[in-house]
């Protein structure tokens, strides 16, 4: 019998920043490109905190050719004098100690995004090397670290003028930790653009030396400019956005609102400049205030009669573009990645500010109020017209008592965590998928043709679409405000379309539907894209399935003496069930792409540009990227 020893000697204590290197995902979310970007965000957020405190007006971010990153600001500069208790430089304490910083006692910063005090030290721990240079008190101080360990003391390396101050941090992420050092400029630029919108008067300059790409962001209009940017391709109902900025109980609330004639809602919330993509109490307060304000105005001015039901939250947010920004001394975020704000008192604060100011705005602008209320009332009528259709596609209870779509080939597994649904293009591919699948846990729903573009359709029209009704029924969650993740029947939903232009279009239509009406499925990591092969290469008994032209050419060049039979799969229906299972549906061998929303603002803009009513932005996108197209059906 093998016994496992368990006593005091088995208890492991991780010293210093060793815990960060051992479990990096606990501190930065992941070690893929998102975690890589998170390192930059942590250092930039520290500089932004200086701007929020009124001491910084410019931040420069540079990606160097060797993949190192420099972040420089003109803030006060990190303190370098000895820490009274630890008897070493405050700079070294901040860079090597978790939960050390000027954001806990309330003296260093009134508000900040990096309240955990782990940002700089975590970046230090996960970098192959890091150097900090501080300009303050007429001197330039520098210290270097390697994998979180100081290799030089804090030393004076030069002098400067008394009025020159700030911090420069340069670091190289550790390739032992990260799977890639290939930063995505578009993602970074979107984040910096957001920060510049939210921090009026701050200049952010970005330079990528790898590509010589350079951009500078500065927005005097703040979040008003942000809303205008989001609505730039839409027909707006107000010439100027509504705007309010007010401080209540040490919480600064800033909100901008502008309606457009579309059907999608675009609300983005921030707490201390951190994009709270999962919402929180500030969003709850905003939605409650908006619904209450519009209903009261509509009744007071005769838009709603005595017997009319109140407008719902969905009604008053149709076509809404809004930015909600709160600044507070002690924000309570969920997790280090700060996706949701949890301060209970913020809901009431935001609600009172928005209710009072937006009520006054509607009273002072009756023509604009009429246009907004008319749109909300029209949305309510459409919602009522869609009610019966919605009821048809809602799951009423146990599967055995509810009729699922006839085209759905369901699986026998009743545990959603073990079940997956393939959404397949066309009856031909659907037939192959139904034969190829493992009936125990794989369900198949074939869709006939292209579903409705929900970006251009209101709910009532959308629910008249047979394919969308079948899809909602199969998933079981309902949609929009009535979405219930507990009723999701499959915890893996896989989009499987042909590798051609039509397949890409159908996949985009489906992604638009999920993003606009079932965003929770994406946020929870339940939506995937299947990766069927492009080619089948056979020489005698040797068979290869390849997924790109480059992979095909590599095999052909490696074996020039062989005679290869090459089959190009344009559609899933061209594969027999055995091939489809082997390449695309077998969990042991398939490749799935997880659909994520790394940046909700950028995703919103992309879907609006690709699928919205405005043609010029889409034309510009096509013309800009035309040369990048590799597979185009003629």
Image: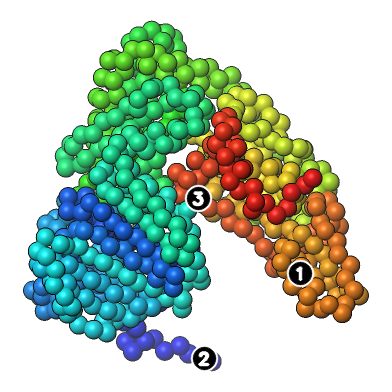
> Within the image, what quadrant is residue 26 found in?
bottom left
Q: Name the residue under label 2.
A: 2
* Disc assigned to residue 553: 1
> Within the image, what quadrant is residue 312 found in?
top left
Residue at the spot 63% in from the left edge and 29% down from the top edge: 462
Of discs 3 and 1, which sits in the foreground?
Answer: 1
Quadrant of image for the C terminus = top right
Of discs 3 and 2, which sits in the foreground?
Answer: 3
Task: Tell which circle, 3 or 2, labels the residue nearer the N-terminal end.
Answer: 2
Q: Is residue 609 above or below residue 598?
A: above
> Helix or strand or loop: what does disc 3 sit on?
loop
Q: In this view, does 66 lie above or below 425?
A: below
Between marks 1 and 2, how big is the CA–CA gap?
53 Å
Between marks 3 and 1, how big is the CA–CA gap?
33 Å
Quadrant of image for the N terminus = bottom right
Left of 74 or right of it: where is 517? right
Q: How is the model colour-coded?
A: rainbow
> Within the image, what quadrant is residue 324 found in?
top left
Q: In this view, does 447 lie above or below 107?
A: above
Q: Position of residue 432 (x, y in %)?
A: 83, 52
Residue at the spot 9% in from the left edge and 67% down from the top edge: 137
Left of 135 or right of it: where is 465? right
Pick whichever, 339 or 131, lies toward us. 131
Between marks 3 and 2, how big is the CA–CA gap?
47 Å
Q: Is residue 416 visible?
A: no
* Disc assigned to residue 444: none
Q: Position of residue 600 (x, y in %)?
A: 46, 45
Q: Mark 3 points at which residue?
A: 597
For mark 3, does the 10 Å Cα neighbourhood hold few (<14), some (14 to 19), or many (20 or more) residues? some
Left of 166 or right of it: where is 422? right
Task: Tell which circle, 3 or 1, labels the residue nearer the N-terminal end.
Answer: 1
Residue at the spot 73% in from the left edge and 53% down from the top edge: 631
């Amino acid at each position: 019998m093998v016994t496992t020893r368990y006593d005091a000697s088995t208890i492991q204590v991780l010293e210093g920043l060793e815990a960060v290197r051992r479990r990096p995902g606990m501190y930065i979310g992941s070690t893929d490109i998102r975690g890589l970007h998170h390192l930059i965000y942590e250092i930039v957020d520290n500089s932004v905190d200086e701007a929020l405190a009124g001491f910084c007006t410019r931040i420069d971010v540079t990606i160097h050719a060797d993949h190192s990153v420099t972040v420089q600001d003109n803030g006060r500069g990190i303190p370098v004098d000895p820490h009274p208790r630890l008897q070493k430089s405050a700079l070294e304490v901040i860079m090597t100690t978790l939960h050390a910083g000027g954001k806990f006692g309330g003296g260093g910063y009134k508000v900040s995004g990096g309240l955990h005090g782990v940002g700089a030290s975590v970046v230090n721990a996960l970098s192959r090397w890091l150097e900090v240079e501080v300009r303050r008190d007429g001197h330039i101080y520098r210290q270097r670290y390697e994998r979180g360990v100081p290799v030089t003391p804090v030393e004076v390396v030069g002098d400067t003028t008394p009025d020159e101050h700030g911090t420069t941090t340069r670091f190289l992420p550790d390739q032992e930790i990260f799977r890639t050092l290939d930063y995505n400029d578009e993602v970074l630029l979107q984040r910096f653009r957001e920060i510049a919108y939210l921090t009026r008067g701050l200049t952010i300059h970005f330079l990528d030396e790898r590509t010589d790409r350079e951009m500078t962001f500065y927005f005097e209009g703040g979040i008003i400019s942000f809303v205008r940017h989001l609505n730039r391709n839409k027909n707006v109902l107000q010439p100027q956005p509504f705007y309010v900025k007010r401080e209540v109980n040490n919480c600064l609330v800033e909100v901008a609102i502008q309606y457009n004639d579309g059907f999608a809602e675009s609300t983005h919330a921030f707490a201390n400049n951190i994009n709270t993509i999962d919402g929180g109490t500030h969003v709850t307060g905003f939605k409650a205030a908006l619904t209450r304000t519009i209903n009261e105005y509509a009744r007071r001015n005769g838009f709603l009669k005595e017997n009319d039901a109140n407008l719902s939250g969905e009604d008053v947010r149709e076509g809404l573009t809004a930015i909600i920004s709160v600044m507070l001394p002690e924000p309570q975020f969920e997790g280090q990645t700060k996706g949701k704000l949890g301060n209970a008192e913020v809901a009431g604060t935001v609600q009172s500010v928005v209710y009072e100011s937006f009520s006054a705005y509607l009273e002072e602008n009756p023509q604009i109020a009429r246009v907004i209320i008319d749109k909300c009332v029209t949305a309510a009528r459409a919602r009522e017209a869609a009610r019966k259709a919605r009821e048809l596609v809602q799951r009423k209870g146990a599967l055995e008592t509810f009729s699922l779509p006839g085209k759905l080939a369901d699986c026998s597994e009743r545990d959603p965590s073990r079940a997956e649904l393939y959404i397949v293009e066309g009856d031909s591919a659907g037939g192959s998928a139904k034969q190829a699948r493992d009936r125990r846990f794989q369900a198949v729903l074939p869709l006939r043709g292209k579903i409705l573009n929900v970006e251009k359709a209101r709910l009532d029209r959308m629910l008249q679409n047979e394919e969308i009704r079948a899809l909602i029924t199969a998933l079981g969650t309902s949609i929009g405000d009535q979405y219930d993740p507990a009723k999701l029947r499959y915890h893996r939903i896989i989009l499987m379309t042909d590798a051609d232009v039509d397949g890409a279009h159908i996949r985009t239509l489906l992604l638009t539907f999920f993003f606009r009406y079932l965003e929770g499925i994406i946020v929870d990591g339940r939506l995937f894209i299947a990766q069927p092969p492009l080619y089948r290469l056979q020489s005698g008994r040797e068979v290869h399935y390849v997924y790109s032209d480059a992979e095909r050419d590599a095999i052909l060049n490696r074996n020039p003496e062989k005679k290869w039979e090459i089959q190009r799969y344009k559609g899933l229906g061209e594969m027999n069930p055995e091939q489809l299972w082997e390449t695309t549906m077998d969990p042991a061998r398939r490749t799935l792409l997880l659909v994520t929303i790394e940046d909700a603002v950028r995703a919103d803009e992309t879907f609006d540009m690709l699928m919205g009513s405005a043609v010029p932005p889409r034309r510009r996108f096509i013309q800009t990227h035309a040369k990048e197209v590799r597979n185009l059906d003629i």
